[in-house]
Image (spheres, rainbow, N blue to C red):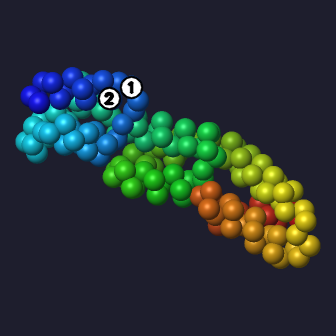
Amino acid sequence: MTLEQALQKARHYCGYQERCHSEVTEKLYSLGLWKKDVDEALSRLIEENYLNEERFAIQFAGGRFRMKQWGRVKIRYELKQRQVGDYCIKKALAEIDEEDYDRVLTKLMTEKWESLRGETNLFVRRRKVQDYLLQKGFEPGLILSALSKNE
């Protein structure tokens, strides 16, 4: 496949949905390009604004928070896995509204607390809620303060 053909496919790939650099790099290699051509294609996609890591990070963080109700810890981890830069990660996490974040944390905590109504031991129930919220990616300090407000 020539560089121009691969670029056309990459433009379509990036136009369909925001992508991070590592996803596009992987796609270009899968199309059979060499490193020199992959670097050229990436720089052209960035120049043409098909590829923007900051835009990707903001959209990824907002989507994962709104749709999957992930906390900042899990979002940060996922963006790191996708090799997104620290600046873009900080900017994306700053876009999450603090009031919405607290509201989602409280909602998830309340729902989990109610689902464990059959658990008679208060400490076990509290631990299960805490573990659930940690797994969703919320910060331990915020979880503890939310649990103490709940009691």
Is residue 45 depicted above or below 81 in this figure? above
How far is disc 1 from disc 2 in space, using C-alphas?
A: 6 Å
Q: Is residue 80 visible?
A: yes
Q: Nearer the viewer, residue 21 or 31?
A: 31
**Direction from residue 44 to residue 20 in the image, left or right:** right
The number of discs equals 2
Q: What residue is drawn where x is 90% and y is 62%?
A: 117
Image position, residue 141 (x, y; %) = 67, 66
Image position, residue 104 (x, y; %) = 71, 47
Q: What residue is drawn where x is 39% and y is 32%?
A: 18
Q: Circle 2 sits on which residue?
A: 13
**Direction from residue 77 to residue 29 in the image, left or right:** left
Q: Nearer the viewer, residue 34 or 140?
A: 34
Q: What residue is drawn where x is 92% and y is 73%?
A: 120
For the C terminus, give its image quadrant. bottom right
Residue at disc 2, secondary structure: helix
Residue at disc 1, secondary structure: helix
Q: Residues within 10 Å of mark 1 (few under 14, many from 20)?
A: few
Q: Residues within 10 Å of mark 2 (few under 14, many from 20)?
A: some
The kind of residue on which mark 2 rests is Tyr
Image position, residue 143 (x, y; %) = 71, 63
Q: Nearer the viewer, residue 3 or 110?
A: 3
Q: What residue is drawn where x is 17% and y is 29%?
A: 6
Image position, residue 139 (x, y; %) = 62, 62
Is residue 115 depicted above or below 130 in this figure? above
- Mark number displayed over residue 16: 1
Is residue 43 depicted above or below 122 in this figure? above
Marks 1,2: beta carbons within 8 A = yes
Q: Is residue 106 visible?
A: no
The kind of residue on which mark 1 rests is Tyr
For the N terminus, give its image quadrant. top left
